[in-house]
DNA sequence: GGCCAGGACACCA
DNA sequence: TGGTGTCATGGC
């Protein structure tokens, strides 16, 4: 008998406590982090963000001005730095061209419209879009990632094949649309995934394996 | 020294 | 639509 998604959340929350995501000082910093962390560990992103701050480059205007090569050097630690430099600039360019440079206006769009507009920007896929919506725009769009899939698959909630939309709509339909709940839920899945559900699972002590605790 | 990380996209059949 | 290659650094 499977636990409900709310049961899973409660169990994770009780075990790990609040994760207080996203670690950032501004909406724009969330967006930069969301792009930089694509297929990369967060520690490397922290270094890049630190450098960007040191150089006073962590703003829409500065990213708009800086050339891709110089930006690439600052974010090199994240890997795929040429791609990511281009993606950061593409995003900022979009906001300047389509929104007169107002990130506020852009993020204030109704959620589903914001989502489809984000997905139109090259380099922003579903997970990055939902991260931006949930943690920068503070709207209830559930974020799915590989950990989410691994955990849900290993606990029998979904098939082996990874389909982003399937998992997202599962959480969106079964949970109350609450921003704080979604923010913590995704962060807790990442926490659980890192500690117990990597490609090589280490299940001993996993809070979802109640028999083992 | 190999494996993997808080993905996205192009290209192919 | 499903599978595969590419992008790249750095921690463990």
Image (spheres, coloured by chain):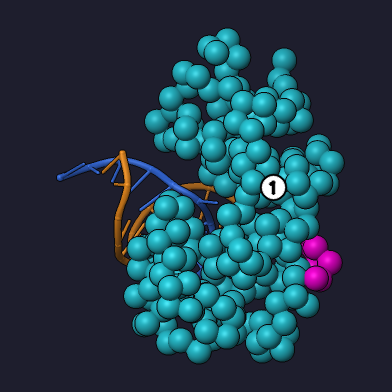
Chain colours: A cyan, B blue, C orange
Query: What residue appears at the point 77 percent right and 50 percent down from the top-left corner?
Result: A179
Return the x and y of residue A154 as percentages of the image width and height: 55, 27
Q: Above or below — where is A191 with respect to C8?
A: above
Q: Above or below — where is A129 with respect to A154?
A: below
Return the x and y of residue A118 as percentages of the image width and height: 67, 69
Is A90 displayed left or right of A175 in the figure? left
Return the x and y of residue A112 as percentages of the image width and height: 80, 63
Secondary structure category for the residue under label 1:
helix
Quadrant the N terminus of chain A occupies: top right
Is B4 displayed left or right of A138 in the figure? left
Q: Is residue A83 visible?
A: no
Say if the magenta span includes residue A77: no
Is A73 displayed left or right of A138 in the figure? left
Query: What residue appears at the point 71 percent right and 72 percent down from the top-left corner?
Result: A117
Q: Above or below — where is A49 with respect to A155?
A: below
Residue identifier under label 1: A183
Chain ID of residue with mark 1: A
Front-most of residues A151 and A185: A185
Query: What residue appears at the point 46 percent right and 86 percent down from the top-left corner?
Result: A66
Return the x and y of residue A59 as percentages of the image width and height: 57, 78
Query: What residue appears at the point 66 percent right and 67 percent down from the top-left corner?
Result: A27
Quadrant the C terminus of chain A occupies: top right
> Where are the magenta residues, as a range?
A108-113
Q: Quadrant of residue A135?
A: bottom right
Residue lying farthest to the top in this orientation = A211
């Amino acid at each position: 008998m499977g636990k409900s998604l709310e049961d899973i959340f409660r169990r994770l929350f009780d075990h790990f406590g609040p994760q207080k995501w996203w670690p950032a000082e501004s909406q724009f910093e969330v967006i930069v982090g969301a792009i930089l962390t694509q297929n990369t560990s967060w520690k490397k992103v922290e270094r890049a963000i630190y450098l960007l701050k040191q150089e006073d480059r962590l703003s829409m205007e500065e990213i708009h001005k800086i050339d891709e090569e110089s930006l690439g050097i600052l974010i090199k630690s994240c890997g795929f730095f040429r791609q990511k430099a281009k993606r950061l600039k593409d995003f900022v360019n979009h906001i300047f061209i389509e929104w007169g440079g107002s990130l506020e206006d852009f993020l204030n769009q109704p959620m589903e419209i914001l989502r489809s507009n984000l997905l139109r920007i090259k380099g922003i896929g579903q997970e990055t879009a939902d991260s931006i919506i949930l943690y920068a725009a503070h709207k209830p769009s559930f974020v799915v990632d590989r950990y989410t899939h691994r955990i849900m698959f290993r606990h029998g909630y979904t098939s082996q094949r990874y389909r982003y939309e399937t998992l997202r709509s599962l959480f969106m339909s079964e949970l109350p649309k609450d921003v704080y709940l979604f923010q913590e839920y995704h962060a807790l899945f990442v926490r659980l995934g890192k500690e117990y559900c990597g490609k090589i699972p280490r299940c001993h002590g996993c809070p979802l394996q109640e028999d083992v605790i």
